[in-house]
Image (cartoon, helix red, strand yellow):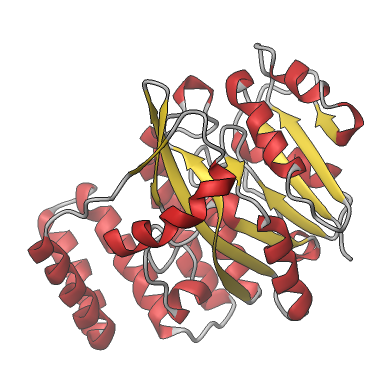
Amino acid sequence: MNGISVIIPVYNREPFLGEAIRSVLAQKYAGQLEIIVSDDGSTDRSLDVASAFGDRVKVVRKPEGCTAQGASGTRNRGIAAATQSYVAFLDSDDFYLPDHLNTMAAALERRPDLGFVFSRVLQMREQDGHRFLASWTRARLTKRDIANPVVSGPYVVHTNAFLFRREVFDTVGVFDESYSNGEDGDLWMRISERCEGAFSDHYGAVYRMVHGTGQLTNEHRLRECALRLWPAALARYYQLNMSDRFRLFRLRFTIAVLQRGHGSRLRFAAALASVLLHHPIYGTEHLGALTVRRAKGPAHLKWIEIPPTADIGVIFEQSLRCCLKSCDR
């Protein structure tokens, strides 16, 4: 059975890192499991937490003299240290749910032609010692979503939800460190341009919503990076001679929307009209969906309270279908 390298990037996540590592160790995966904690220069006791697990965790320290900081370089150092056939990523303040890696690896074993597989993700917020869970992943995923992760829209793929074949990174490359944000979406798009993926319809990880100052991403710079990322994806569409018209529509539509705040309203309207005229079917479908969404009003997630002492792995199955029925993003 192929082994799995789980890469956990960390920067000052002492309170949460132990839970992340334990969730990987609890997977009971039959193959070899390599846990790599890649540090970005933590100044708290995060590395002590990782080292306390002994030889079950490989710690990759930030090189001396390295002044760059961020999730991209931290994850890339983890990829360079990975030795197993499959690679997964888990943020240091999040955690896996039981049997996730077995399910994911089985999907890749069944389909040697696949480059990656991804699952659903739960989100969690904490308040006064209590935990509340809700579904993060969109309720219904289509074949278009699976073939076009990130491009098709939000709440489809999450960094914690993937399992990749190691050779995917040899073919496509790694995280682009020139992006301060959105580097994960950029890589997922580049991978889906060259590799086929699949969706495993199970909840595999929990995303902790309140991250604080130790989070390795900064949402305030997302828009600026998006203005580079999406045009680059459109350019690759033509360079690779792709023929997915839905993907082309979504790329052009997103670029037009992003430019709304960077020019005159007239120019934005002209760009959007051009997209809709060139893609009337997808444009009508998309605008219809937006109209329905607005008529319904904002989506309200159904949060399910988890007692402070409860083992999420024991009770989460009872909550999932309730979450799924409660919200369709």
224 over 276 or under it: above or below: above
Q: Residue at x 64, y 48 (%)?
A: 175
Q: Nearer the viewer, residue 257 or 304?
A: 304
Quarter of the rendering occupied by the N terminus: bottom right
Q: Residue at x 43, y 66 (%)?
A: 151
Q: Nearer the viewer, residue 281 or 303?
A: 303
205 over 165 or under it: above or below: above
Residue 118 x, y percent position in the rendering:
59, 63
Asked if residue 126 lies left or right of residue 312, the reply is: left
Q: Nearer the viewer, residue 317 or 25?
A: 317
Asked if residue 34 lies left or right of residue 181, the reply is: right
184 over 60 or under it: above or below: below
Number of numbered markers? 0
Asked if residue 84 lies left or right of residue 128, the reply is: right
Q: Quadrant of residue 45?
A: top right
Q: Residue at x 52, y 76 (%)?
A: 147
Q: Quadrant of residue 123?
A: top left
Q: Nearer the viewer, residue 223 or 304?
A: 304
Residue 128 x, y percent position in the rendering:
37, 20
Q: Residue at x 87, y 63 (%)?
A: 2
